[in-house]
């Protein structure tokens, strides 16, 4: 027994000394047309954690990412020959390699952090699953079309049925399936109260430096209050806690503001730009879009940075330099 434990310890030490395979590849569902609220929250949390650890990674969207994952859940990362799935396992693996965000915490601080991690995983994850797979309005209008969008008929219907059965089994075991929406909202509010009280006026939950708790909370809060969130009641609840909203904005600004447009920006630009520039009689769509200046400004920024004569000339010169 002692020899086996010693061998395990030596193996862990050797693994920690191995260089990081760069870049890390993060696999997740397609963001624009497929990903659902719970998966989006988890993927954002892992992305935030990797960025906080200053680890390079590339995102690889796959329609079957859930079936590629070792645990059947997303996201998962590929580090060399290793596949590690889900937030907790990814954090544990990265910690074993010597990149930890919580080394500065005391033993009591680490216990507190794990308690809040458990709270977030229990409340937010189950609430997100309930809203997506139990609430009939969201289930039929959002969940089924998105979850099955990348698969042909009748496979899409079977996979929707299979996933919903799996979620209902989980929620039943945890005592969530028989809740009503008001009870779910109440649990979300209580969780927000606890997190807001812990955050107080600090920059992050445990002082000036982020931990895995900051990454996890960011992922869930950002997903829940995004413009594409499927439940406006939860959005309204979270906006009652400006400290949490401010924390999410702070993490996004510090770790995600690269200035480069992503695939969602491209998709929104294509539609909005077409609507507001196509001359049509009594163009009601254009009038609606013009009432949202943030969307119009987004289109102007992308047009200026990518389609102005100066931008096109710069891109042409860069292409010629690469060829030479």
Image (spheres, rainbow, N blue to C red):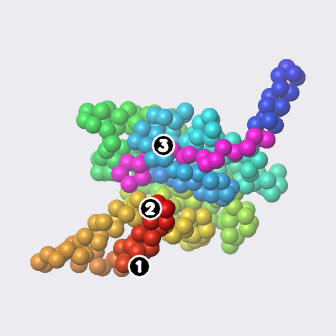
- Which residues are the magenta region? 16-34
In this rendering, does residue 207 appear at all?
A: yes
* Of 159 and 258, the residue lying toward us: 258
Q: What residue sits 67% from the left and 57% below the top?
A: 54
* Of 149 and 300, the residue lying toward us: 300
Q: Residue 166 in the image: state x and y as whole percent.
A: 44, 34
Task: Tell me the CA gap for discs 3 and 2.
Answer: 36 Å
Q: Is residue 84 above or below residue 259?
A: above
Q: Is residue 114 above or below residue 228?
A: above
Furthest residue toward right: 2
Residue 202 lies in quadrant: bottom right
Residue underneath mark 3: 176
Residue underneath mark 1: 310
Furthest residue toward front: 324
Q: Does dot 1 land on a helix, a strand or a loop?
A: helix
**Label 3 neighbourhood size at 10 Å, few (<14), some (14-19), many (20+)?**
many
């Amino acid at each position: 027994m002692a020899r086996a434990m010693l061998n395990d310890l030596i193996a862990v030490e050797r693994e920690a000394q191995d260089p990081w395979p760069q870049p890390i590849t993060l696999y997740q569902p397609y963001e624009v047309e497929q990903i659902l609220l719970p998966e989006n929250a988890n993927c954002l949390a892992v992305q935030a954690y990797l960025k906080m650890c200053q680890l390079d990674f590339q995102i690889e969207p796959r329609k079957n990412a859930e079936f590629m994952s070792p645990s059947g859940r997303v996201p998962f990362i590929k580090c060399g020959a290793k596949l590690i799935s889900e937030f907790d396992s990814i954090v544990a693996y990265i910690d074993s390699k010597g990149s930890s965000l919580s080394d500065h915490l005391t033993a009591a601080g680490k216990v507190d952090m794990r308690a809040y991690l458990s709270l977030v995983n229990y409340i937010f994850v189950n609430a997100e699953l309930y809203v997506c797979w139990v609430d009939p309005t969201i289930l039929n209008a959002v969940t089924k079309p998105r979850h099955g969008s990348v698969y042909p008929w009748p496979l899409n219907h079977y996979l929707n049925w299979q996933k919903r059965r799996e979620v209902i089994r989980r929620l039943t075991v945890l005592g969530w399936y028989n809740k009503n929406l008001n009870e779910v909202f109440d649990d979300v509010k209580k969780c927000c109260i606890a997190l807001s009280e812990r955050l107080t006026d600090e920059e992050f939950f445990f002082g000036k430096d982020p931990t895995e708790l900051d990454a996890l909370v960011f992922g869930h809060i950002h997903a829940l209050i995004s413009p594409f969130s499927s439940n406006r009641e939860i959005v309204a609840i979270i906006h009652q806690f400006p400290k949490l909203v401010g924390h999410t904005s702070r993490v996004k600004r510090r770790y995600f503001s690269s200035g480069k447009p992503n695939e969602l920006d491209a998709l929104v630009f294509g539609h909005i730009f077409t609507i507001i520039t196509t001359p049509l009689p009594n163009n009601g769509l254009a009038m609606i879009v013009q009432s949202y200046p943030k969307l119009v400004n987004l289109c102007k920024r992308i047009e200026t940075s990518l389609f102005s004569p100066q931008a096109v000339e710069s891109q042409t010169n860069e292409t010629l330099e690469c060829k030479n």
